[in-house]
Amino acid sequence: MSSEILQSPSGRELLEREMSRQHADALASLRSNTGMAERVAASVAKTGKLLLLGMGASHYANRIAEPLYRQLGSEAWASTAADQLHSPLPPALRTVIIVSQSGESGEIPELVRGLADDEHSFGMTLDASSTLGRSLPCLVGAGGSEVAFAATRSLTVTLALHAAVLSAIGGSDGGAAASLLSPPAAAVDEALHALVNKPVMVVSGQGVFRGLAETSALMITELARMPALGFELGQFRHGPLELLSPDIGVVVLRGAEENSAAMQRVAQAVSGAGSTPVIFDCSGERPLPGAVTIALPRLQGLGAVLAMLPSLQRLIIEIAARKVARVGEPVRSTKITRAA
């Protein structure tokens, strides 16, 4: 009998395991939820209104998808489950999708109880046996619940579930499947060098990249235990530029058909403050001067988000690993935040 003591995997190991299978699980999720996605699409066609509810990274996944639903003609809004409980919207005919990878976190169980009998209420989860999975018709992500602390695989899978619904509504997954089949691999060494010694970070983007900026900032805060802010690009320009200094690291997410002039002004402001901006770039355009550019294929929408995610995840984890001794092992949080 071996005398070796079996050790539990570290937080970093759990993150790496989740990321290693996120694309296969997301692709399986996109392909296996067409029936439920069509039910949701039929509801949206009837109501014309869509309310997306979640907490944490699930909320930010909804923020990524929200403008894409609007582009397809839905009156779509992404709000937190807590806001809907404490300051609910007036009753109306609308489609509701509650998103929670665990199906148990925070205010989700209480919220579900109030919607269980509504034919236009649905869920998205990675756990079909959860309160959410048992209570509402759900799109269910492949691979089971995520076990690592910060959202990596769960975010990618949730975006694939949104892609299934968007495809059922509009006939296209927005390039999601292509980016999941062949995720770009971009080196982040130069970006890591530019950001690793910054005590504060900002991530900013427009459209679908607004939600991606917000969830990236959350991941930085969770893993590196440092202040990180996620801003819509226009909001970043309206006042928060005052925080810029050599100590502030800035990441800008750039897709095809974005406002290049606005992005260039932000990059110039960052450079002028003594810091080097890092641009995750799916625009296909010339790199912005004075910036570290992580060049990715020319894409927009969910295809661009899913193309950026692997390199963003890698950069954030490498920054965190240089700031935190046991990265991915929280000291004040749990994977599932329970309501008090």
Image (cartoon, rainbow, N blue to C red):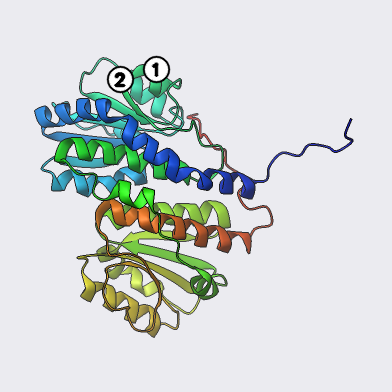
Q: Is residue 201 left or right of residue 295?
A: right
Real-space Cα separation, disc 2 to disc 1, in angstroms: 14 Å
57 shown above or below 323? above
Residue where numbered disc 1 is placed? 134
- x%, y% of residue 84? 29, 33
Residue where numbered disc 2 is placed? 114
Amino acid identity at mark 2: Gly
Q: Is residue 168 left or right of residue 228?
A: left
- Residue 2 visible from this viewpoint: yes
- x%, y% of residue 227? 50, 60
Amino acid identity at mark 1: Arg
Numbered disc in front, either 2 or 1? 1
- x%, y% of residue 95? 19, 29
Quarter of the N terminus within the rendering: top right
| Residue at image point 50% right, 43% down | 21
Q: Which one is nearer the viewer's eye here, 230 or 316? A: 316
Mark 2 neighbour class, 10 Å CA radius: few under 14, some 14 to 19, many 20 or more: few
| Residue at image point 48% right, 56% down | 313
- When asked about the image quadrant of residue 197, the answer is bottom right
- When asked about the image quadrant of residue 55, the answer is top left
77 shown above or below 230? above
- Residue 225 visible from this viewpoint: no
Q: Which mark is residue 288?
A: none
SS for dot 1? helix
Q: Which one is nearer the viewer's eye here, 318 or 269? A: 318
- x%, y% of residue 281? 34, 68
SS for dot 2? loop
Q: Count the marks.
A: 2
Q: Is residue 176 left or right of residue 152?
A: left
The answer to which of marks 2 and 1 sits earlier in the sequence is: 2
| Residue at image point 16% right, 37% down | 169
